[in-house]
Amino acid sequence: MIQIRNLIAEDATNFWKLRLASLQNNPVAFLATYEDFASLAEDELNTIYIERYLTPIDTKRIVGAFDGDDLIGMMCLSRENSVKTMHKAELWGVYVKEAYRGQGVAQQLMKSVLDEAESMDGLLQIQLSVAQVNQKAIRFYQSFGFKSFAVIPRVVFWNGVFYDDEEMIKYLDN
């Protein structure tokens, strides 16, 4: 049975492995590269992920899907900190291991993230960027009420090819 929960500091190694897999298996979907992350030292990993994202705080969450002890999917939500922009959050780092796709894992993750977002006082919208070539992901986000509002051309340049990003938004106050 798949368990959905917020990641904590003790999940750092599992998170790291899944993040590397996501970057290696879907390089166009992420701005970071596998090589960038694979070269980080363990102390940098601790600073970047444990302190910034895996330590529970009100503005950032990484929700994970587990099959036993195996982290098989994740979705990250980061809320803006400024008084003028704290009504917004960004969804990022979305990934499910290929063997688990099509089994409802991403839907479970999204439901959990949206439940968390709706419980955040004053959070009114969630934005995300998705590679425009990833039409399956765009349809997935649309099924949860996200709407496209812009296309940013040439966001990624990978292996001699430019890729555009589609910007999407979901309003929580409707």
Image (tube, rainbow, N blue to C red):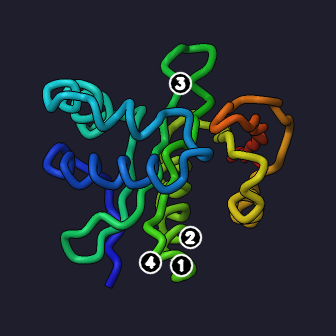
The residue carrying pointer 3 sits among few (fewer than 14), some (14 to 19) or many (20 or more) residues within 10 Å by Cα, namely some
Q: Earlier in the sequence, mark 3 or mark 2?
A: 3
Secondary element at tag 3: loop
At x 75%, y 43%, the residue is 168
Q: Tell me whether the residue at label 1 lies in contact with that at label 2, contact meaning CB atoms closer than 8 angstroms.
A: yes
- Name the amino acid, label 2: Gln
Residue 104 disc label = 1
| Amino acid type assigned to the residue bearing label 3 in the image | Glu
Q: Return the residue at label 2.
A: 107
Residue type highlighted by circle 1: Gly
The residue shown at (71%, 29%) is 155
* Mark nearer the N terminus (1 vs 3): 3
Percent of width and height locating residue 63: 39, 54
Question: How much space separates mark 3 and mark 4, taking CA atoms?
Answer: 33 Å
Q: Give the number of the mark in front: 1 or 3.
A: 1
Q: Which mark is residue 25?
A: none
Tag shown at residue 99? 4
Label 3 and label 2: CA atoms lie apart by 24 Å
Mark positioned earlier in the residue sequence (4 or 1): 4
Report the number of numbered marks.
4
Task: Choose between 11 and 57: the one closer to the eye.
Answer: 11
Q: Which residue is mark 3?
A: 80
Bin the neighbour count of mark 1 within 10 Å (Cα to Cα): few under 14, some 14-19, many 20 and up.
few
